[in-house]
Image (tube, rainbow, N blue to C red):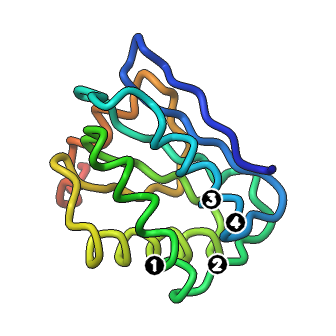
C-alpha cells in the first residue's frame, strides 16, 4: 500500500505519506486504520504529504465514497489538516478531496490548508494557522 502514517506525539501531528500511484482504495484503507486510533486525538492535526506521488487515481465520486471513513477520523477529534501537494495533478485532486470532505462531513475546527511547499513536522501547526498575508512592497 503506497500510503502510510505515523503519529508524532511531540507535535500532535499525524503524518500521512503517500508515494507512487495512489488509488481510492489506498486512501480509504489508511483512513479506516486511522479511525482506530484513540477516540480522543485532542489537538491533533493531519499532514498529508503527497510529495512522492506520481499519480492519484481518484475522481469526485470516489471522494464521496471515502468521505465516510474521513468522517470517522473527524469523530476521533482531528482538529485540522495541511496537505502538501507539489504538482498540478495532486494539487487539484487534493483540492477536490478537501472540498468534498467539507461538503459531506463539515469543516474541521482548525480548517484545511493546501501547500505546494514541503513542511517540517514542527512547522505544520503554525502553517495551518497563518493565513496568507497581502504582498508587501520592498524598497
Image coordinates for residue 13, horizontal then vertical, percent: 42, 28
Task: Give the structural element (helix, strand or loop) at label 1.
Answer: helix
Disc 1 target residue: 96
First in sequence: mark 4 vs mark 2:
4
* Marked residue nearer the N-terminal end (3 or 1): 3
Residue situated in front as seen by the camera: 25 or 97: 25
Quote the CA–CA distance across marks 4 and 2.
9 Å
Q: How much space separates mark 3 and mark 1, taking CA atoms?
A: 14 Å
Q: Residues within 10 Å of mark 3 (few under 14, many from 20)?
A: many
The tag on residue 25 is 4
Q: Are marks 3 and 2 in contact (CB under 8 Å)?
A: yes
> Residue 33's spot in the image, x, y percent?
57, 42
Q: Which is closer to the viewer, label 4 or label 2?
A: 4
The residue lying toward the viewer, choosing from 92 and 137, is 92
Mark 4 to mark 1: distance in Å?
17 Å
Numbered mark located on residue 58 in the image? 2
Element carrying mark 4: helix
Please state which of the two labelled residues, at mark 3 or mark 1, is closer to the viewer: 3
Marks 3 and 4, how far apart in space? 6 Å
CB atoms of marks 1 and 2 within 8 Å:
yes
In the displayed structure image, the side of residue 85 where residue 112 appears, left or right: left
Numbered circles on residues, count: 4
Q: Nearer the viewer, residue 131 or 17?
A: 17
Amino acid at each position: 500500500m503506497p500510503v502510510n502514517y505515523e503519529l508524532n506525539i511531540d507535535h500532535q501531528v499525524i503524518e500521512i505519506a503517500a508515494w507512487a500511484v495512489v488509488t481510492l482504495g489506498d486512501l480509504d484503507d489508511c483512513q479506516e486504520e486511522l479511525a482506530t486510533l484513540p477516540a480522543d486525538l485532542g489537538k491533533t492535526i493531519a499532514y498529508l504529504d503527497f510529495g512522492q506521488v506520481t499519480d492519484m487515481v481518484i475522481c469526485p465520486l470516489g471522494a464521496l465514497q471515502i468521505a465516510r471513513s474521513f468522517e470517522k477520523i473527524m469523530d476521533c477529534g482531528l482538529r485540522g489538516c495541511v496537505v502538501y501537494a507539489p504538482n498540478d495533478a495532486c494539487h487539484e485532486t487534493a483540492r477536490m478531496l478537501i472540498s468534498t470532505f467539507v461538503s459531506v462531513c463539515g469543516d474541521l475546527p482548525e480548517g484545511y490548508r493546501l501547500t505546494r511547499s514541503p513542511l517540517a513536522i514542527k512547522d505544520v501547526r503554525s502553517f495551518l494557522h497563518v493565513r496568507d498575508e497581502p504582498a508587501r512592497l520592498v524598497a
